[in-house]
Image (cartoon, helix red, strand yellow):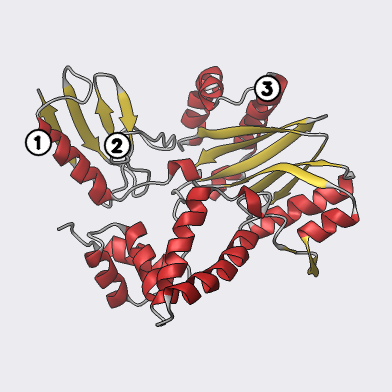
Amino acid sequence: MAEITASLVKELRERTGAGMMDCKKALTEANGDIELAIENMRKSGAIKAAKKAGNVAADGVIITKIDGTYGIILEVNCQTDFVAKDGGFQAFANKVLDAAIAGKITDVEVLKAQFEEERVALVAKIGENINIRRVSSLEGDVLGSYQHGARIGVLVAAKGADEELVKQLAMHIAASKPEFVKPEDVSAEVVEKEYQVQLDIAMQSGKPKEIAEKMVEGRMKKFTGEVSLTGQPFVMDPSKSVAQLLKEHNADVTGFIRFEVGEASRKLRLTSQQKLLQCLNSLNQRKEAPEGGFFLCTLRVNQPSAYSLCAEMRYIMSPELTPILIVDSPRKEIWLPMQNPFTNAFCLS
């Protein structure tokens, strides 16, 4: 049985708004898996929704730049908002952005290598860790961007739109956080998971399965609309949807990117601390390295929040921290969220 820590209960409360005892019970039943606990709470009707996981303990800036039909969006992290406003830090971030758009560089590791010496010098001068976190690009007939302060940035690509329209669309995306362009773009995996949750909720109302399934069909249409750009009410005129707005202008959105300081990419959705330890214990019991040779795991934590490794031993890079798990054969770097520093080692041979 996984340990249900106070910090885990606190996180679940913050994400669901549920009571402390309800959160503790849900975590116990889910063996410490916070995502499973949320799913079970939704199915039982205890909550309707939950805030997304994924924020990291980081500050910094999101900046964008467009050159004709090509745009770049970049996140550079520091540790405090004080440094995020520092002129030297902002100049460094803009220099990285200029290099990214000039060379059409979308591999963050290339940018890190190119600016490592300058980054180290800036860290020594400012006294905070600084990291180039992520970069992405977008191409299209018409590009627009919007920055809400320095913490949220958006790039939008469209056809048949003027600059004013794409600017408005970018502002909408910043405020409404759509995840897809159109309802039909919502992935099958996301749809299936939500369908099962909604079906369980409908079945618990005592309705026959056939009726419950029809109820869920309506809910799913609403769900895919809520998470897609064109299905959302337009923030500047909620009487119309974004789809209606685009139709009025005979325009179409071909893509968008939204970055917010500290958020994690969906692909970097972490597992719980307990799953990491279960994974290491499982490897320890196998008495062999997953790819042969010598396997050594050393856990070392010096920050309260980061990303943990998935149970399949895939790894996640969290650039604002030092590596806390090093695997030789081959060498990999892994990151783990913990409340207190500790060191542990597993030697498999």
Give the residue furthest to the front.
Answer: 210
> Which numbered circle lies on residue 104?
3
Quarter the N terminus occupies: bottom left
The kind of residue tagged 2 is Glu
The kind of residue tagged 1 is Gln
Above or below — where is 82 with respect to 334? below
> Which numbered circle lies on residue 69?
none
The residue that appears at 29% across and 57% down in the rendered structure is 33
Q: Secondary structure at mark 3?
A: loop
- Is any atom of residue 139 visible in this view? yes
Whether residue 274 sits left or right of residue 44 in the image: it is: left
Measured Cα–Cα span from mark 2 to mark 1: 15 Å
The kind of residue tagged 3 is Lys
Measured from the top left, where is residue 31 in percent x and y?
Answer: 22, 59
Residue 228 placement: quadrant: bottom right
* Front position in the image: 93 or 125: 93
Tally of numbered discs: 3
- Is any atom of residue 46 visible in this view? no
> Which numbered circle lies on residue 312?
2
Residue carrying label 1: 285
- Which of the two labelled residues, at mark 2 and mark 3, occupies the earlier sequence position? 3
